[in-house]
Image: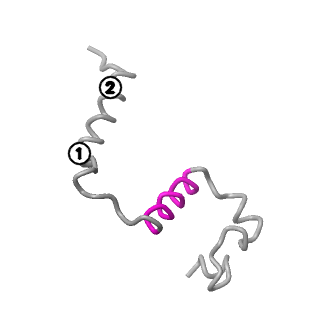
Amino acid sequence: MLFGLIMPEGDLSVESAPPSYRGHRSPVAGRFASALEDIAANGLPVVEECTPWEELREAHLARLAAQRPAVA
């Protein structure tokens, strides 16, 4: 409901948003929007070509541990 108060119904493009809304759009939101546009244009990737989220999580945790090893 709040989003409808900020932007008019029907036109949800960033260009039509008030300047205060456009100014708060972060790079993360841009990457998210880009990913959604890609999915809308091309569909979801084939499951066999995807990496399970558990593997992504473990790889990320390993990178974090390498950056900051535990204190003995």
Label 1: element kind: helix
| Location of the C terminus (image quadrant) | top left
The x, y position of residue 11, in whole percent, is 65, 80
The x, y position of residue 8, in whole percent, is 67, 83
Label 2 crowd (10 A; few <14 / some 14-19 / many >=20): few
| Location of the N terminus (image quadrant) | bottom right
Question: Closest to the observer: 12 or 67?
Answer: 12
Q: In this view, does 48 lie above or below 67?
A: below
Taking the spot 47% from the left edge, 67% from the top edge, the residue there is 41
Which stretch appears magenta? 28-40
Taking the spot 23% from the left edge, 45% from the top edge, the residue there is 54
Which disc is residue 65 wearing? 2
Which disc is residue 54 wearing? 1
Picture quadrant of residue 24: bottom right
Any magenta on residue 39? yes
Please identify the residue farthest to the front as the structure is shown: 42
70 displayed left or right of 6 = left
Please identify the residue farthest to the right as the structure is shown: 19
User: Could you tell which of marks 2 and 1 lies nearer the N-terminus?
Assistant: 1
Label 2: element kind: helix
